Image (cartoon, rainbow, N blue to C red):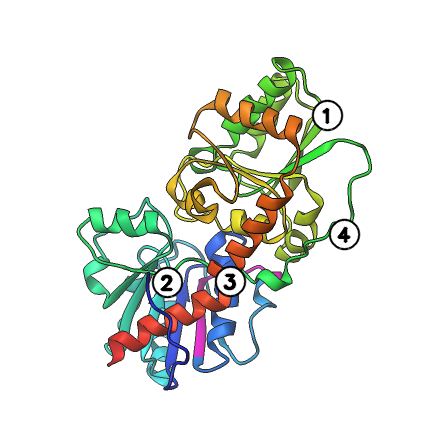
Amino acid sequence: MFEISKKIKCVMKVAHIHWSLGTGGIETMLPDIVSEQAKTNEVALIIVNDWVEKSILAKVDKRVKVVLLNRHAGSKNPLPIIKLNLFLMRFRPDIIHTHAYQEIKLVFYPFGKRVRTIHNTHNYCDEYPKYDKLIAISKAVQDFTANQGFESVLAENGIPVKRILTHPSSPFQDGKLHFVQVSRLYIKQKGQDILIKALELVKHKFGFDNFVMHFVGDGQDKEMLKQMAHELNLDQEIVFEGLKDQTWVYENLCNFDLFIQPSRYEGFGLTVAEAIAAKVPVLVSNIEGPLEIIDGGRSGLSFENKDVTDCANKIVDFIKQGRNEAQVEAAYQYVCDHYDVSVTAQKYLEVYQSILK
């Protein structure tokens, strides 16, 4: 575990670069990270492409220098890249911190240390030698990076725990159990098809229909998932809520009875931590990232990855047994201690300091 010192002594100039500021895990965390860092350092946030959610951008602290290059994704127009490097020349950062593949290729400014946060266990490693330090968001990602032959520092993703409501704000009044997943609708990674097939077993094999499953998010597989729900006779049990902003998520997660994350692979699982911070029980596939968040199973429920029947069995167990209040409280404390965004921001600063010596 990377040790956190009490205080970072010197002021640094830090430039974060990312492709977009949408509703994904990286994008929703970045404003919190840069805002925390700006309390004691000079920080810039550079967004390359023109996908910028206003609600996410509004979260950024006024002390952060925000640069929107408004490039169309895939554009070969060199002007936004020239603007990026001209800004770096004026800002003169000590640290250039990127968060996704190929972002470092945009940087021609020759000074400053390069840092990359690796956010998933499915990454190309050809760029890693260009960085002075690699950061892994979970032990799973750190192990994956090591298997590729590269050393990384562990700095887990963080969430603003205190901004997430823990007491139901608008509880459901229909007497049913309400399950939720907050995620991009992309079955190759997020596994919503596994969950829908499991819910079909819960209803038609085990005979439980006193539930509603809410999918919060959007993505390329939405229509296919809707069709699957219809074909499996789950129209009354499954609701596609569409995309919701982060404020809605933080204010409404607490209204649900169970958060389910059936991902096939996941570097971390930010929404799992958010659900726990809302004091909602969680059920996750037993892959390394989410398992870390639930402390190996001590702070939540898990099922065998990709196993529809085991997922159904665990949902049925929850329906029968209900909420384990002691486990929910222990999980909440674990997330507060390990995954608050202030801890993540501090770890990043520690990494920067170590390579500037």
Name the mark on residue 340. Answer: 3
Which of 235 and 68 lies nearest the eye of the viewer?
235
| Numbered marks: total | 4
Task: For label 1, count other residues whose C-alpha is less than 10 Å away and answer few (under 14), some (14-19) or many (20+).
Answer: some
Disc 4 target residue: 169
Which image quarter: residue 61? bottom right
3 or 2: tag closer to the N-terminus: 2
Question: Sequence order check: which comes first, mark 1 or mark 3?
Answer: 1
Q: Are marks 2 and 4 in contact (CB under 8 Å)?
A: no
Measured Cα–Cα span from mark 1 to mark 3: 34 Å
Mark 2, secondary structure of its residue: loop
Q: Which mark is in front, 2 or 4?
A: 4
Q: Give residue 77's mark.
A: 2
Residue type at mark 2? Asn
Say whether residue 9 is left or right of residue 63: left
Q: Is residue 37 visible to us here?
A: yes
Q: Which residue is identified by label 1?
A: 210
Tell me whether the residue at label 1 lies in contact with that at label 2, contact meaning CB atoms closer than 8 angstroms.
no
Q: Does the magenta segment cover residue 249? A: no
Query: Residues at badges 1 and 3 in contact (C-beta under 8 Å)?
Result: no
**Other residues around mark 3 within 10 Å, as few (<14) / some (14–19) / many (≥20):** many
Q: How far apart are the two marked residues, 1 and 2, measured between alpha carbons?
A: 54 Å
Which residue type carries mark 4? Ser
Which residue type carries mark 1? Answer: Asn
Q: Residue furthest top?
A: 205
